[in-house]
Amino acid sequence: MKKCCLLIITLAVLLETNNAICQTIALPDTNFRNKLIASYPSVMSGNLLNIAAANVFGPDLIVSNSNISDLTGVQYFKSIYKLDASGNNLNTIPDISTFKNIQYLYLNNNQLTSLPNLSSLTSLLQIQCHSNKLTSIPSLTGLSNLLVLFIWDNNLSSLPDLSTLTNLQQLIIGANPLNTLPDLTPNSALIQLHCYQNNITQIPGLQNLTKLQLLVCWGNAITDLSALNNNTTLTTLWAFGNQLKTLPVLSNKLSLTSVQLANNQLTFDQLLPIQNIYSLTDFQYAPQDSTGIYTVESIRALDSIKLTVKEDSTLTTNAYAWYKDNNLITTTSSRTFTIPSSQASDSGSYKVIITNPNLTLLTLYHRSWQINMLKCMDLSPYTFVINSNECSKGASISFSNLSLPGSISPYQYYLQPDLSKDSILSMSSDFTGIKPGKYSFIISDSRNCSVQSEITIPKPPKCDPVIVVANGNSQMNSYFIEQDGTAKVLDMEGNVIRQLIAPAVWDGTKSDGSLADAGYYVILLNDKKLTNITVIR
């Protein structure tokens, strides 16, 4: 009885084993099936995948560039060391968490938006899944043996924790919309770091990457790479297209062969020393962004204009071509352009173009200075007072609250009668004996800068108008017509000897400029009698 039972059990086990060995499945993707039939026929039973054969297949499964859209069935290849499914049309990857031996996972150039759980694949040495549509990367914390991580050209806005990847040697994460990078301090084994075309402004932990040989960080907004100062192993630095204004120490990097720094904000004093690195075979430094700051300045006439290039302050070999409104003014070795005493015509846009004979491919353009010229001084609103106004003595006037922005004392004050070149001088802004009429009130400072304003001294009331045309007489020698209109001066015979557009001053002269004869005259305003007037000679 016992022998019979044993025989039945043995037969059952054999039957179960045989069924397992012969178990097959159909693959949903025709291209995947055809690739396995053509390249790996040992895992196929006709058009079906032999599961048992797939379980023990190895070492490498390479199904790249085969137009595969569905990789269902690959999960049975548990013993492989490499899976290369690059260059297909994959949207997802089946669960491969049982691939305990896999060391190389290549999924580049697909349509993947996510990856399966990878945390159990502790034997992985390389992960390459660049050129997909990944928006996230699963946890990598268990992959301490990982040497290579290529995930460039995806849609990653953040990275997973990389602190446990202490053996990582190559990290390529460029062309992703990353605003920040994780602290790379734990990744001190890194030899290559490619973080180009991200949106980063710094590389955290860079100072601890003392084994780094290649740094490719172009196309970012990085302003400072001084964390590389103590690195001595660097061979390649591609940092073009950033916002660098200074450079790290490069003279201690004795194996440095390639430096590309174009399209930063560097000047000649930063770039010239790089030429002395004897190991360098590739040095690209031009063009650079404009230097300096766009400046708008308001300068008062007669003040000096001084424009200075602050960059390259220690260099003496630069040449500076100075321009005003795009017209060349001068070419000089001085980084300062000066106009000692400016004029109104000096308003305009100034710029300087900088070259250096030792870096002939580079031309620096300094951002412009916009110079707006102001009057040499201004006359703010003031108080004008007529203290007295008598027929025989004239007016006594004074000015107060005089504010003169931009001026330099001492001052001189003038009253210049309308239609006359002669003027009355005062050193105190007080005037006496001023006859009626229109005047220009002129103030001049120590630089002969002057401003003027218009004032009017009215006629004293109830004065008999008399004009004395002989010099030195204390009487008035002109008559002021205050009202608007056309004024005519007629002699006693009714002849018009002078015609004026009022307000105006009649100074006792005829239309031809000669002195009127002594006698009595009539002034008509708009053909109506205004006054009688006596001329004394």
Image (cartoon, helix red, strand yellow):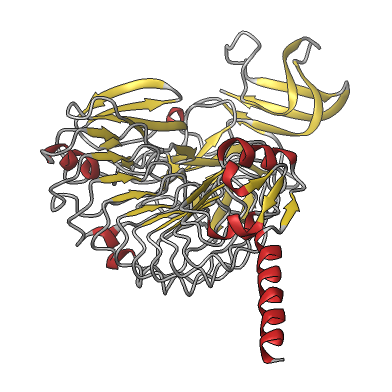
Decide if residue 1 is on the left or right side of residue 331.
right
Number of disc labels? 0
127 or 366, which lies in front? 127
- x and y, in percent, of residue 153 in the image: 55, 46
Which residue is at a point 53% across and 72% down the rendered structure image? 120
- Asked if residue 281 is positioned above or below residue 517 in the image, the reply reads below
Which residue is at a point 66% across and 70% down the rendered structure image? 14
- Asked if residue 482 is positioned above or below residue 487 in the image, the reply reads below
Name which quarter of the figure residue 232 lies in: bottom left
87 or 75, which lies in front? 75
- x and y, in percent, of residue 207 in the image: 28, 66
Instruction: Tell me the quadrant of the picture where the N terminus can be found.
Output: bottom right
The answer to whether residue 382 shows anywhere in this view is no
Instruction: Tell me the quadrant of the picture where the C terminus can be found.
Output: top right
- Extreme residue in the right direction: 528
Which residue is at a point 42% across and 70% down the rendered structure image? 183
- x and y, in percent, of residue 365 in the image: 37, 33
The answer to whether residue 196 shows anywhere in this view is yes
